[in-house]
Amino acid sequence: MTQIANYGSWKSPIISDLIVSATIGLSGIYLDSNDIYWIESRPSEGGRNVIVRRTSDGKITDITPSPFNVRTRVHEYGGSSFIVTNSTIYFANFTDQRLYHQTIDSPPQPLTPAGNWRYADSIFDRPRHRLICIREDHTTDGEPINTIVSINLDNGEDIQILTQGNDFYASPRLSPDNSQLSWLTWNHPNMPWDGTELWVADIKTDGSLGEKQLIAGGINESIFQPEWSPDGQLYFISDRTNWWNIYRIEPPFSKGAGEIEPICEMPAEFGLPQWVFGMSTYAFTSNNTIICTYTQNGTWHLANLNPQTQELTEIHTPYTDISGIKAKNNNIVFLAGSPTGFTAIVQLDLTTNQPTILKRSSELTIDSGYLSNPQPIEFPTENGQTAHAFFYPPKNRDYIAPNNQKPPLIVKSHGGPTTATSSTFNLKIQYWTSRGFAVIDVNYGGSTGYGRAYRQRLKNNWGIVDVDDCTNAAKYLAEKGLVDSEKMAIAGGSAGGYTTLCALTFRNTFKAGASYYGISDLVALATDTHKFESRYLDGLIGPYPERADLYKQRSPIHFTELLSCPIIFFQGLEDKVVLPNQAEMMVAAIKAKGLPVAYIAFAEEQHGFRRAENIKKTLDGEIYFYSKVFGFELADAIEALPIANLDNS
């Protein structure tokens, strides 16, 4: 029987214990012969990353034993942390960052020497019996040195630098005949979604590289995922015409030779922001068949692309978020999600175009009466422009709210900021909507998936465009009568935490907020953060220290006198991306002002929380905080959190 209860006070079966115990992360698909490998990130094991193998008969087993944690820290964010050949696995271990190797039946053994080096994005160079990969050298003072190296598989101490001198490298790829190597590179202050270069070189008899040729790219062109076709043509994704589309170039690659040809020109994004190594949106099944994924208006599609005829044929699936495409002959495997289903590893039969789910991130079954479906919206924002978001109205089959009551709202500002949110089923969002909250997940200007021009809206405008779009999303819903304008909160992590803190400081739209490892001091971020992002702010704000004035103007820590609402902070004390002192300075300032504030620190967490008990504490802690500042009763018994100045509210 349906009950009447205030929004926020609805009892939900989607509890925090369920979320953290029943879900895992999936990534890193790799195909070896008829076997399929992937990584599972398990909150129940402290966030440990485990390589898992599925054989052709459907048997799934763990490969890497505890305590090994398969995760590289190159660029801090990692990615592409293992490869497999003939059932021998090579992987990066998190605690010591060494490369290890093991067979299916033997324990891991170290390949590379102990020391302050990190490795990622490996490929096999079989004729020369070596790995080729990215190495990040932390053995010297100053910034770490990134290079492409080869590592002898018989003697891991035999390491040869193949190319060096630029700030960053990614995506080393061998031609089908193993005679040439291609790679991506870029320099400060560019990020890989701003501008990268694609290079090619012959491999000499001693294994070193011959003359290096620049093929495509530059400071204003982002190249993504170079791949060699089976017949030796070089393909890549470029945003040279605003949209990340697929291109190819035929050898020879000497200067002036080889014409770059678009393969599929359309107003859609085939590329992604390269925050991690190993991202993949297309793969070859033959010379004449590419299986690819692209996004339009926030929804990803799967397609079959004939590079000879340039004909694109959509493969209809129930999925709206598709990535990590891998192919071996007619065996297609990818990561996929939908608004009604958990992220899963999916295998596609090309003869029938029928997908088969190999592994879900959760086996939970939740009654649809408790699930809110995302509604894509386009709403007006500043300068006559529009922005994009997914709106989730509150939904719980057991409850309705009293007449004339409107739901509280949480605006989600995604991290990055150069990334995007999607409509994939997210239990953390359903946690809120099933309790009577509305949620809007905003793809503010600067987000990916809507073309380079939309992405460039944030250039020199971080802390302005993103904040305007998040506040305008909330105002749009309030004006439509869909939410309570007096109970609107904003929450975000990392860069989304910065947007959150800016919105709470420089605007008067929100009545509360939650910052997850968010940035409050841009100068501290510019001077204290790691190499990969150390010049990111040059494009988002302006060069530092030349534009130190802008850094101060857009740093919430310098304008705490403008704050007028409660905030809760969550922070990992081992975070090297956003240092804990940023949250601690903000908390101290808010506390001194007499506003309600809570600070929850986790001793063993870094940038993003991986431990089940901590993820649980953030979910329950945030709703507990809102219950106190918005004045509603919780349906569940949740552990109380210390909130300073609560009696002052």
Image (cartoon, rainbow, N blue to C red):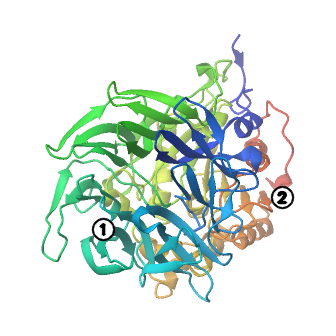
First in sequence, mark 2 or 1: give its number.
1
Category of crowding for the residue at label 2, using alpha-carbon neighbours closer than 10 angstroms: few (below 14), some (14–19), many (at least 20): some
Q: Is residue 508 visible?
A: no
Q: Is residue 157 left or right of residue 6?
A: left
Q: Is residue 323 left or right of residue 497?
A: left
Residue displayed at 40% across by 67% down: 192
Nearest the viewer among 618 and 230 is: 230
Query: Relative to 318, is 209 above or below?
Result: below
Q: Nearer the viewer, mark 2 or mark 1?
A: 1
Secondary structure under the numbered disc 2 in the rendered image: loop
Nearest the viewer among 71 and 7 is: 71
> What is the CA distance from the residue labelled 2 to the residue labelled 1?
67 Å
Nearest the viewer among 285 and 504 is: 285
Q: Amino acid at mark 2?
A: Asn
Q: Is residue 270 visible?
A: yes
Answer with the quarter of the image where residue 539 lies. bottom left
Nearest the viewer among 408 and 494 is: 494
Disc 1 designates what residue? 179
How far across and down, in percent of the image, does residue 62 sit?
67, 43
How far across and down, in percent of the image, does residue 472 sit?
46, 50
Q: Amino acid at mark 1?
A: Ser
How far across and down, in percent of the image, does residue 43 sit?
72, 46
Answer with the quarter of the image where residue 37 lies. top right
Q: Quadrant of the N terminus?
A: top right
Secondary structure under the numbered disc 1 in the rendered image: loop
How far across and down, in percent of the image, does residue 436 sit?
65, 31
What's the mark number on residue 645? Answer: 2
Residue displayed at 51% across by 83% down: 549
Counting the numbered discs, the total is 2
Q: Is residue 353 left or right of residue 500?
A: left
